[in-house]
Image (cartoon, rainbow, N blue to C red):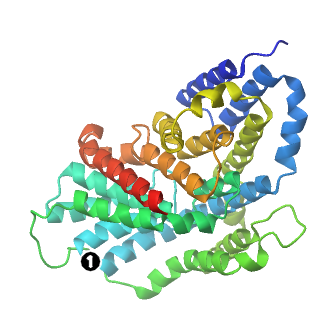
Amino acid sequence: MARVNPCISLLVGMLVLVVLLIRKAPLWLIFIITGTLIAILAGGLQVFPGVMERVIYSTATWDLVTIMFLIAVFVMLYRETGFVDQLSKELAALLQKPCIVSMLVPAVLGLLPVPGGALMSAPVVDKMGEYIGLSRARRAFVNVWFRHVIFIVYPLSTVLVMTAVMTGNSIWDIVLIQIPVALAMIVVGYFIGFPRKKQYSGSAPIAGKRDNKALAKTMLPILVTITIAVSTSWILDYRLPIPVGRLSMIVGVLTGIILLASTARLSLNRFTKVLISREPIELALIGFTAMYMRSVFESIDLSCVTTYLTTANTWVLLVSVPMFFSLAVGIVSSGVALSISILGAIVELNVKNASLIYLSAFMGYLGSPLHLCYVYTVKYMKTTLIEGYKYLVPAIALTMLITLLLYSIL
């Protein structure tokens, strides 16, 4: 079979990817089909042995697969045990103050990124927003914005893990450099989401008494997981001759899973059902196929693409490419995986550039009309996407401007 120009191959692959996304094919299957199609068109069948060798023998592959699987199990256990609902209730009872409740409850529930998870915090934000006189569109903005702030610095975010692994950087270095961005998001969200015109006083009318024991019980597995992952990274990571390198994350999440299952007295049958359920397996497959996509791009000659892209400013590429992919498809992981695969041949994937790819993809995803958290929230609040964009678009633009200013002086 005659080889096709790599630029044309890439274009065909991206068109197929968009069609498959529209048809709602699983993301792991999209990565396999797109990567394989591009590889065959641009390089022929002979590139596959090298592609698969890099994927299978890479420590990064098995780090990504293992960590994404375990995090998915951890999140599902929180949902299966009812701990996530209890955590939301106890936080609202603890905080009482309307603005703080509206910001913190979505943020804490963001620690557990379940599909459509914004709906868990939407009733609380709706109640608080009505109490302090926020419009329905503002309530939708507050719920979506503050739910996602935590993902900027949350080491158990599967997409943040993917970014670190695919770029070869420490997740802690990326988290550290993004802390100012998360703080900026909080400030931006506060001033846009809570106008100073409204006056109110006292505590919000939240039903139920505070139960500190229940709050501690539901938060403990998350806190233990993060503490172990942070404190053992310098001891465990890349020290042993095993297929995985980021052992601290694996040990941390495993400990959290065991603690959560034992605290909730989860039966072996229910625990097994979670382990073999679709979500953890699909996330593990997404991790593997993302590395497959990256290996495909490393195997073919993309000079026809890089010749044009290298004429552009590096930061323009690091912002526009990931933001475009995430905005177009409403899936942040696809924006990250595709951008790293393409931009890796053009720019150095150091911590700052890796962070900028992640943040740009994330902001594109946040504002995408296909972003399910946003779609579900505006529907719940009985408003529209356009009304919500009055607050969401300025917040995204201002956050990206602050990010670029910060990174220019770092």
Furthest residue in direction top, as rendered: 2
Judged from the image, the secondary structure of the residue bearing numbered disc 1 is loop
For badge 1, the amino acid type reads Gln
Visible in this render: residue 277?
no
Q: In which quarter of the image is the N terminus?
A: top right
Q: Where is residue 23 in the image (x, y as percent from the top left)?
A: 56, 27
Q: Which quadrant would residue 38 be assigned to in this image? A: top right
| Foreground pick, 200 / 246 | 246
Residue at 68%, 74% in the rendered image: 252
Q: Nearer the viewer, residue 87 or 324?
A: 324
Residue under the image location 77 percent in, 71 percent down: 237
Q: In this view, does 273 lie to the left or right of 83?
A: right
- Relative to 185, is 231 above or below? below
Q: Is residue 79 visible?
A: yes
- Residue 20 in which image quadrant: top right
Instruction: Please indicate whether residue 15 sits to the left or right of residue 107 in the image.
Output: right
Total number of numbered discs in the rendering? 1
> Which picture quadrant has residue 64?
bottom right
Residue marked by disc 1: 96
User: Where does residue 43 sit, x and y in percent of width and height?
Assistant: 81, 24
**Depicted 67 relative to depicted 1: above or below:** below
Of all residues, the one furthest to the bottom in this rendering is 213
Q: Position of residue 340 (x, y in %)?
A: 63, 44
Report the residue at 68% width, 45% height from top.
286
Crowd tier of the residue under label 1, counting other residues whose Cα lies within 10 Å: few below 14, some 14–19, many 20 or above: some
In this view, the residue in front, 264 or 11, is 11
Q: Which residue occupies 36% across, 70% down?
A: 104
Lateral position of residue 231 relative to residue 3, left or right: left
